Amino acid sequence: MRCPYCGSIEDKVIDSRESPDGSEIRRRRECLKCARRSTTYERLEESPLLVVKRDGRREPYEKRKVLNGVVKACEKRPISMEAIETLVDEVDREIRQEFEKEVSSTEVGERVMGKLQKLDDVAYVRFASVYRSFKDLNQFMRELRDLLNSKK
């Protein structure tokens, strides 16, 4: 690892810590030439996973996009960021375990909705209304009726 200050390749690791989820290691390093310290992160290189959109386009899967969608659905709801991150981590883990190269956007959306439905009804309906792109009030009402019937 090159020192970001002087460019030397001689350094020593002072401290190593694993992230809470075990996905990366944070290392504090000290340059043996200029004695300045820097931080590096080591994480496993994941093979790229593509999302196949409804129109057939393919784009890289980004956990951040799933997180943003769930955060929007949970706005002004009594749901902690920790619960949201846990939900997204579970979806991410399931998808990466089951799909090697490609996953449909439908599969991602259905998994998110399944977990949101257990977490918060309002967040579920918000997410479903965007994900399923309801065309009219009747579609929206059918979804609400199905939700109410499943709760009974």
Image: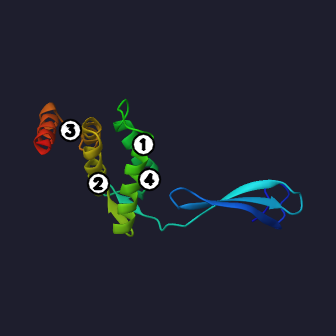
For residue 51, above or below residue 75: below
The residue at the far right in this view is 33
Q: At label 4, which amino acid type do we have?
A: Lys
Mark closest to the chain's N terminus, 3 or 4 = 4
Please give the residue where the numbered disc 4 appears in the rendered image: 63
Q: Quadrant of the C terminus?
A: top left
Please give the residue where the numbered disc 3 appears in the rendered image: 134
Instruction: Please state if 7 lies on the left or on the right of 145 as rendered.
Output: right
Between the residue at mark 1 and the residue at mark 2, the CA separation in whole angstroms equals 15 Å
Q: Quadrant of the N terminus?
A: bottom right
In front: mark 3 or mark 1? 1
In front: mark 3 or mark 4? 4
Please give the residue where the numbered disc 1 appears in the rendered image: 68
Between the residue at mark 2 and the residue at mark 4, the CA separation in whole angstroms equals 13 Å
Please give the residue where the numbered disc 2 appears in the rendered image: 111
Residue drawn at (89%, 62%) of the image: 33
Residue drawn at (44%, 54%) of the image: 62
Instruction: Please state if 99 lies on the left or on the right of 30 as rendered.
Output: left
Residue 121 pos. (x, y %): 24, 38
**Residue in the foreground of this view, choosing between 20 and 51:** 20
The residue at the far top in this view is 76
Q: At label 2, which amino acid type do we have?
A: Arg
For residue 26, above or below residue 137: below
